Image (tube, helix red, strand yellow):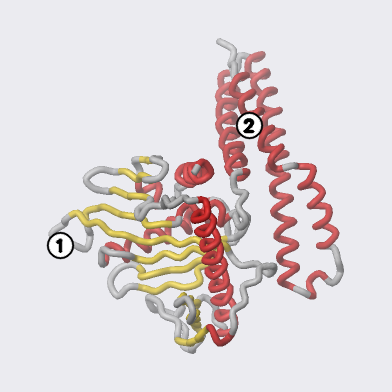
Amino acid sequence: MADLDLSQEIAALRETFASVRQVVDVERLTGEIEELKVRASEPNLWDDPENAQIVTSKLSRAQSQVTKLAEVQAGLDDLEVLIEMANAEGDSVTQSEAKQELVALSKSIGELEVQTLLNGEYDSRAAVITIRAGAGGDDATDFAEMLMRMYLRYAEQHKMPAQVLDISYSEGAGIKSATFEIDSPFAFGTLSVEAGTHRLVRMSPFNSAGKRQTSFAAVEVVPLIEQTDVVEIPETDIRIDVFRSSGPGGQSVNTTDSAVRITHLPTGIVVSCQNEKSQLQNKAAALRVLQSRLLEQRRREEEAKKKQIAGDVKASWGEQMRSYVMAPYQMVKDLRTDYEVNNPSAVFDGDLDGFITAGIRWRKRA
């Protein structure tokens, strides 16, 4: 049996991995971990729960990154040993195992490499995602619910904690809008490339004639506000309304006015939260989302000023950033990166890695 030779592939992975380690700066990261450990061990840390949460989250994030780097390094070393064993024993099963390990390491290093591109000011933050149904009637509201499920499935598959803050159900099918929080390191940097207008083309299940229908939904992604951010919101700038939580029915619907809606009067931004049973908790969550949106608005205004100064008048994001076509053929295509797949069902089930990776690389080039 011929020897298995993966030396070129492993050398290429080692070169990429070395670049990743250099960008991450493992020595600096290790020093940061030691500093955070000292802060986390202070006896009065939890006297300020919000600050304690920030410290422990940063520590967990940094430790996770160092652990991932160590695992990849060990995996590369073990792979070479595995290949030597397979060739020495002429074992086809072990050779097959080595090939599978190469694929897994390629994926892990690719993910680490993409993460090094997430170096924007807010990229390391958690994310708040809002989905709104657009034109298309029941198809659009159904599409909005399909997108919400898609992102929640993606978060579940990547072990990213997600919490639905607010849902406005449609009288027909699906939802008018939904807001949910994905509380994971780099969630904003990763998912911000999903922001924009999404288009669905399919044979409408709501049309008795079975005609093809095009519908739209908008996805907004903003970074979650942190304690260190300063977004002052005077009380005179907001209106707070309370109401009963709404839903499809059953025991989950509250019988008290615990849901909260906050309107930011200067901008017209409206935020609702009905996830918690307590009115105070819903108010706090809604304020956090409002601050996040105001922070993102400020960031966009700053970016617009920079582009104006630079003389760049080209729009970076088109009205339709992705099309999901289910009839007359099967295809999902990103119109910015030209990345496409022929399995819409898998995409709607959360298989977004290819689109997100292509989007992050495209944004970096742009």
Disc sitting over residue 280 in the figure: none
* Residue 35, placed above or below residue 68: below
Question: Residue reaching furthest left?
Answer: 209
Q: As drawn, is 210 to the left or to the right of 296?
A: left
Rendered-image quadrant of the N terminus:
top right
Q: Residue 189 versus residue 342: which sits nearer the camera?
A: 189
- Residue depicted at 39% across the width and 69% down the height: 177
Q: Quadrant of residue 331?
A: top left
> Hey, what amino acid is under mark 2?
Thr
Residue 158: x and y in percent read 55, 51
Q: Residues within 10 Å of mark 1 (few under 14, many from 20)?
A: few
Q: Residue 46 versus residue 262: which sits nearer the camera?
A: 262
Please tell me whether mark 1 sits on a helix, a strand or a loop: loop
- Residue depicted at 58% across the width and 33% down the height: 106
> Hey, what amino acid is under mark 1?
Ser
Q: As drawn, is 155 to the left or to the right of 60?
A: left
Please tell me whether mark 2 sits on a helix, a strand or a loop: helix
On the question of residue 125 being in view, the answer is yes
Q: Residue 233 versus residue 113: which sits nearer the camera?
A: 233
Give the CA separation, mark 1 to mark 2: 54 Å
Residue 216: x and y in percent read 31, 59
Say which of marks 1 and 2 sits in front.
Answer: 2
- In the picture of the structure, the residue carrying the numbered disc 2 is 16
- In the picture of the structure, the residue carrying the numbered disc 1 is 208
On the question of residue 162 being in view, the answer is no
* Residue 11, placed above or below residue 133: above
Residue 74: x and y in percent read 71, 33
- Residue depicted at 76% across the width and 74% down the height: 48
- Residue depicted at 36% across the width and 48% down the height: 345
Q: Residue 51 versus residue 230: which sits nearer the camera?
A: 230
Which badge, 1 or 2, comes first in the chain's sequence?
Answer: 2
Q: Residues within 10 Å of mark 2 (few under 14, many from 20)?
A: some
